[in-house]
Image (tube, rainbow, N blue to C red):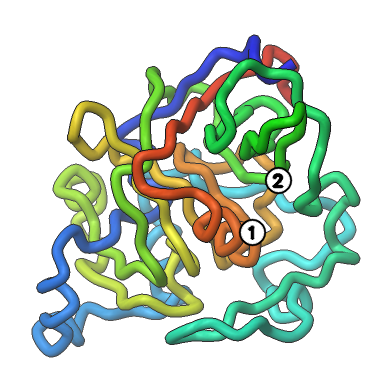
Amino acid sequence: MCSTLTHRCNQDRCALDALGRAALNDDEEDRSESKASTMVSRRAFLIVLAGAPLAACNNTHVTGVPSENGSASWYTGTMPDEPFPIPLVDRRYLPAEYLAQTVSYLGRERPGTVIVDIDQRFLYLVEGNDTAIRYAIGVGRQGFSWKGAAYVGRKSVWPNWSPTSNMVKLIPDLPRYASAGIDNPLGARALYLYQGGRDTLFRIHGTNEPWKIGQAASSGCIRMLNEDVFDLYERVPVGATVLVRRSGRSRA
């Protein structure tokens, strides 16, 4: 099954999907005063992006469930976390297969390997004994590809956001910084994928748009429910292997 998949994702476009990258150095968190004027809410992000050339990042909402305009109804309570509580998604809005669960897995990868199936829109954490934990994900639209195995180069709790230089060129009016929080597009956790000691700009991260889980509606990085990426973050160490693949069984 998953052991025969092929993998792809895009470097620059991946960064656009996440609306940027978390600050790479700790000292960036100390610049809050100088960046205060550029900190924006999620609504401001959407306003800026509305006229930007990022059609691939737009989402087609699932019929019959609340979407962006009714986002509050997607949540039912919170789970404790620092420095912010994590909003919990109302599972009634999710198909049963989208719930994190242990499944049979017959691949040859070692326990601790992360497998991302772009077409089926699932992420697997191999556990051994022919099992894996499966999480539902949101992925990039077809055509935004990135090749090669990677590894988790670093991890971040409630990451800040700042745009890459390429993003600024594409969208000059894009805000230059957003602090960590519920409205941050990177969500509660982020795992940064590296190759040969270099950041690929490809991330596995949370999302404040749970209605995009299960869809190929963005431009690259892998999105997870915040409660799911919290769980993955706790289980996956820096240095873990990540394989992004295609199964050849793409959904409509």
Near-viewer residue (143 or 197): 197
Classed neighbour count for the residue bearing mark 1: other residues with Cα under 10 Å, few (<14), some (14–19), many (≥20)? many
Q: Is residue 7 above or below residue 170?
A: above
Instruction: Give x and y (percent) for residue 216.
Output: 62, 37
Instruction: Give x and y (percent) for residue 183.
Output: 47, 75
N-terminal of the pair, mark 2 or mark 1, is 2
Question: Disc 2, disc 1: CB below 8 Å?
Answer: yes
Q: What amino acid is labelled 2 in the image?
A: Ala
Instruction: Give x and y (percent) for residue 127.
Output: 66, 38
Viewer-nearest of discs 2 and 1:
1
Residue beneath disc 1? 228
Q: Is residue 66 above or below residue 40?
A: above
Q: Is label 1 in a helix, a strand or a loop? A: helix
Question: For this view, does 159 lie left or right of residue 4?
Answer: left
Classed neighbour count for the residue bearing mark 2: other residues with Cα under 10 Å, few (<14), some (14–19), many (≥20)? many
Q: Quadrant of residue 160?
A: bottom left
Question: For this view, does 87 lie left or right of residue 167?
Answer: right
- Name the residue: 37% across, 34% down: 151
Quadrant location, the C terminus? top right
Residue beneath disc 2? 136
Instruction: Give x and y (percent) for residue 169.
Output: 17, 46
Q: Is label 2 in a helix, a strand or a loop? A: strand
Near-viewer residue (165 or 193): 193
Question: For this view, does 204 lie left or right of residue 210?
Answer: left
Q: Is residue 116 above or below residue 73?
A: above
Q: What amino acid is labelled 1 in the image?
A: Asp
- Name the residue: 17% across, 85% down: 32
Quadrant location, the N terminus? top right
Near-viewer residue (30 or 33): 30
Q: Residue furthest front?
A: 129
- Name the residue: 23% across, 39% down: 199
